[in-house]
Amino acid sequence: MIRYLVFSVFILFLPGFAQAQNNTLFDDSRVSSVYIDLPADSFNVIMTDILSDHYFRARFIFDDGITRDTLQDVGFRLRGNTSRYAKKKSFKISFNEYVSGRKYQGVKKINLNGQHNDPTMIREKLFYDIWKRSAMPERRTSFVMLYINQEYRGLYTNLEEMDKQWLEGIYSNPDGNLYKCTYPADLVYIGSSQQLYKDIPGGSVTGGRAYDLQTNETLDDYTDFVNLVTILNQPADSLFVTAITQILNVDMYLKSLAIDVASGNWDNYAYNKNNFFLYDNPSGGRFEYYAYDNDNTFGVDWSGIDWTTRNCLDWLNHNEPRPLTSKLLAIPSFRNRYELFLDTLARCRIAPDSIFPRIDSIKDLITPAAITDTYRTMDYGYTFDDFKNGFIQTIDDHTPYGIKPFLNARKQSILDQIHPAGIGDTEGKTPWTVFPNPASGSITLFAEENFFTVSRLFILDIYGRPVKEFPVKSGNNNHFQLAVSDLVAGFYFIKILTSGDCYLKIIVKE
């Protein structure tokens, strides 16, 4: 009986994304220092009037260990939602608040997140590392030690602001509408009037819209957004497939969902109708999706749900509509691509041999700053032992998993769920490796053991149509070199006809 194996391959994926420019502000190989000096009475107002978004005038010093820069008259305020009530608070710095148009190392704003509810303080950074490694548009992050009026306030994650400036670093045309979507942003159709969506209040403690336009604010034109929501709430049929692929980068959302699910991120669109951006990219004419505020990940829980074993194929909150997720996953071809992304993440992104060395290097990097950070102990009483143990074991009710045990269990849970008994080999494993991925010149397809007799070898497009066939020589059944430089940028499958009796969905390895 002839069966076949199917692999996903990304070739020249996401060609519109530019490389981020290197600078020490976001150099994640070091822990730099940020010094903020401002009048004591101004800082007292910041710390007491916690719902205010008023920027107070301050002096900013950035010391990367080699160079020390000073900027006068920057804006300084609190940031965040419920974290404003924490004792270790998070802050936003605006370099152009009092000096119009000013940038520092190419950016106008940065965010300093205290990570007060994460004993390891690395979960958000780790999420963005996986996001970047998955060929998604980078949000630069690093670690800094924060000093305010000469007092050490602890270790902070330094995150790039997701704004027009950020878009300029990613796209050739950054002039589209960027929407920041917060709870209860469910993308449910409530009518054709723009004002209906503008009037939905966001769940932030400081107010604002649930669908908040961050660019082109003067025009305040939500026509594109209403069009997207209208299409998302149509029946999931062939007309829907045509319409949604014309207005939304479907693969980008499916990959983002897979990253959320693989990392246990429940504070997202699919489960909690929260924490995402939508950008109407003028160059491609389609919306693109980005996750943000990703600290409730890698085993963190606040609702008594085990996110480590939750079904990756059934992640949604079923008590409320989520048309963006439910409609896409109702389309078999879209669901299959989502599963392919999940499998790639499980085998190559969150697998211990891939991610544990990165976790260890981050831990080693930040340990000196964490030891002396007394502010991180004030909210949940986290000790230095909790910092060390948070990587390997339970700390408290809302961190029931250490990061490494979570990743071990999550990987296996995903593979068990997308490769049920009877599909693939008995352990949900495959002898095949594909690298590099993404690729631009050639791909190596390799099996450590010669399990199969390969009869034919193809590359298929996303619709399953053969676009290229490769010769198979007698006696060469475990190593192939596939030239792909002649293929246009996009998403492809490798199909291998064998004389074995197994069916495997994907194996991807860079």
Image (cartoon, grey):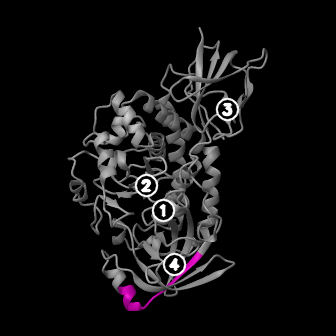
Q: For residue 63, which numbered disc appears in the image?
A: none
The percent position of residue 208, horizontal first and vertical second, equals 28, 65
- From this view, report whether residue 33 is shown above or below residue 303: below
Which callout, 1 or 2, points at the residue further toward the start of the chain? 1
Residue in view at x 34 percent, y 30 percent: 239
Q: Which dot, 2 or 4, sits closer to the camera?
A: 4
Which callout, 4 or 3, points at the residue further toward the start of the chain? 4
Read off the residue under disc 4.
102
Compute the Cα span from label 1 to label 2.
8 Å
Compute the Cα span from label 2 to label 3.
34 Å
The percent position of residue 193, horizontal first and vertical second, equals 21, 51
- Give the secondary structure at mark 1: loop
Name the residue type under label 4: Arg
Magenta residue check for 297: no
Determine contact: label 2, label 4, CB under 8 Å: no
Residue closest to the far top: 1
Read off the residue under disc 2.
399
The percent position of residue 479, horizontal first and vertical second, equals 75, 26
